[in-house]
Amino acid sequence: MTDTPEFSRMIDLRSIGDAPVELTASEVERAALARRFGLVAIDRLEARVELVPDGDAVEASGTLDAAIVQSCAVSGNDLPVTIHEPFTVRFVPMSDAPAAFDEEIELEEDELDEVEFKGTAFDLGEAVAQSLVLAIDPFAVGPDADEARRRHGLMEEGAAGPLAEALKGLRLD
C-alpha cells in the first residue's frame, strides 16, 4: 500500500485564492477508490470547494457530485446511485502535543470535521474521497430486494417488515 491516497490533490496554504477549487477524479483514480470503498464502480467524482483561510487553519466547504454503482444490500445486484452531497471540513495544523485517545469526543451537528496536516499543504482530494464514502448508504437496496427476500424465505407474503409483524399481533378481529 502506498502513502499517497488514490485521489490526492495537495493544496498549499500560500496558493489559496478567492476562486473555488474544482476537482475531478480520473478514470484510474475512480477505479482505485471503488476498490478501496468496496464499490462496483465510480463512474463520476467531482467537487467544487470554497477555501477560506482562518489563521493557520482552512475551512473547506463545497459540494461533491458522484455517480457510483454499489451492490444492493439484499440481492447483491448492481445498484446505480447518484450522490449530490454538501460537505465542510476544517484543515488544522498538526499539533505537537501527543494525541489523547482514551477520551471519546462528541461533535455537535454544527461542529466541523477537522483534518490535521503537516507543513504548508493539505490533501483536499482525500477529504473529498472520505466525504464520498460517508455519503454512501451501506444498506441501500434496489427494486428487486423484496423479491430476493421472499425467494430466500426472509419475508412472508404480504408482510412489509418487522413493524408489520409486530402490528399483525395487535389486530382486534
Image: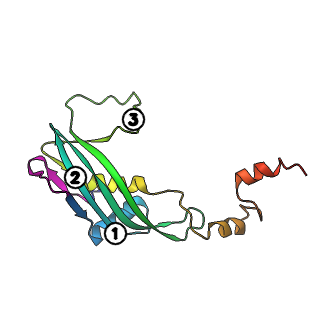
Looking at the rendered structure, the kind of residue marked 1 is Arg
Give the left or right position of residue 94, taking residue 169 as reference: left
The segment highlighted magenta reads 7-20
Quarter of the image with the N terminus in it: bottom left
Q: Is residue 11 magenta?
A: yes
Residue placed at 34% from the left, 69% from the top?
44
Q: Does the residue at mark 1 contact the one at mark 3 (Cβ under 8 Å)?
A: no
Ranked by sequence position, the earlier of labels 2 and 3 is: 2
Disc 1 versus disc 2: distance between alpha carbons? Answer: 20 Å
Q: Does the residue at mark 2 contact the one at mark 3 (Cβ under 8 Å)?
A: no
Residue placed at 41% from the left, 33% from the top?
106
Q: Position of residue 22 (x, y in %)?
A: 22, 61
Closest to the camera, between mark 2 and mark 3, is 2
Which of the numbered marks, if any, corresponds to residue 44? 1
Under circle 1, the secondary element is: strand
Which of the numbered marks, if any, corresponds to residue 172? none
Disc 1 versus disc 3: distance between alpha carbons? Answer: 31 Å
Under circle 2, the secondary element is: strand
Ranked by sequence position, the earlier of labels 1 and 2 is: 1
Q: Position of residue 42 (x, y in %)?
A: 37, 68
Residue 3: in sight, yes or no? no
Q: Which residue is identified by label 3?
A: 107
Give the left or right position of residue 159, taking residue 20 as reference: right
65 above or below 93?
below
Residue placed at 40% from the left, 39% from the top?
109
Looking at the rendered structure, the kind of residue marked 2 is Glu
164 above or below 156?
above
Which of the numbered marks, if any, corresponds to residue 50? 2
Q: Label 2: few (<14), some or many (≥20) within 10 Å?
A: some
